[in-house]
Image (tube, rainbow, N blue to C red):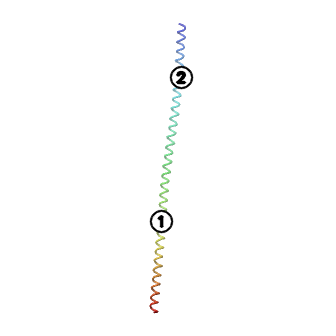
């Protein structure tokens, strides 16, 4: 009977010990899970920040491109205006020279 009582006491001790180990394991599992979730949340937040940053960069680049295009258009208009003026000046000079030659020819014809 004493041996049996001793055996039952050992079993009870083992049962208590196993319960303690299970509780400890549960706590560690919960801790690991919480840690994993925190890391995942951090990763998601970083990814979102990165995407927002990239979107801002794209918008900035698009705006810059539009500004450059507008500047180029303005520059082109200026050049076209300058070309028109130069062409008009050239035409006027040519007509003046032609008129001069015509006048000279008339006076030469008159002399001869």
Residue 72, given in percent of the width and then of the height, sits at 48, 62
| Mark closer to the chain start, 1 or 2 | 2
Q: Residue at x 46, y 79 (%)?
A: 94
Residue 9, given in percent of the width and then of the height, sits at 54, 13
Task: State the separation of the CA atoms marked 1 and 2.
Answer: 82 Å
Q: Residue most toward the top?
A: 1
Q: Indicate the secondary structure of the residue bearing disc 1.
A: helix
Q: Residue at x 53, y 12 (%)?
A: 7
Residue 106, given in percent of the width and then of the height, sits at 44, 88
Q: Which label was assigned to residue 47?
A: none
Density class for disc 2 (Cα within 10 Å; few <14, some 14-19, many ≥20) is few
The quarter of the rendered structure image containing the C terminus is bottom left
Image marks 1 and 2: residues in contact by CB distance under 8 Å: no
Q: Which label was assigned to residue 76?
A: 1
Density class for disc 1 (Cα within 10 Å; few <14, some 14-19, many ≥20) is few
Q: Which residue is mark 2?
A: 21
Q: Residue at x 54, y 8 (%)?
A: 3
Tell me: residue 41, above or below residue 5.
Answer: below
Q: Residue at x 51, y 45 (%)?
A: 50
Q: Indicate the secondary structure of the residue bearing disc 2.
A: helix
Residue 89, given in percent of the width and then of the height, sits at 48, 76
Q: Residue most toward the bottom?
A: 112
Count of labels in the image: 2
Tell me: residue 8, above or below residue 31.
Answer: above
């Amino acid at each position: 009977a004493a041996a049996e009582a001793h055996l039952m006491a050992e079993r009870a001790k083992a049962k208590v010990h196993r319960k303690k180990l299970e509780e400890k394991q549960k706590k560690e599992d919960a801790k690991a899970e919480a840690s994993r979730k925190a890391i995942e949340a951090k990763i998601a937040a970083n990814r979102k920040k990165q995407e927002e940053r990239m979107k801002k960069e794209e918008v900035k680049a698009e705006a810059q491109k539009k500004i450059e295009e507008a500047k180029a258009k303005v520059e082109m208009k200026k050049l076209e205006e300058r070309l028109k003026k130069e062409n008009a000046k050239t035409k006027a000079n040519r007509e003046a020279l032609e008129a001069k030659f015509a006048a000279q020819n008339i006076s030469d014809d008159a002399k001869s």
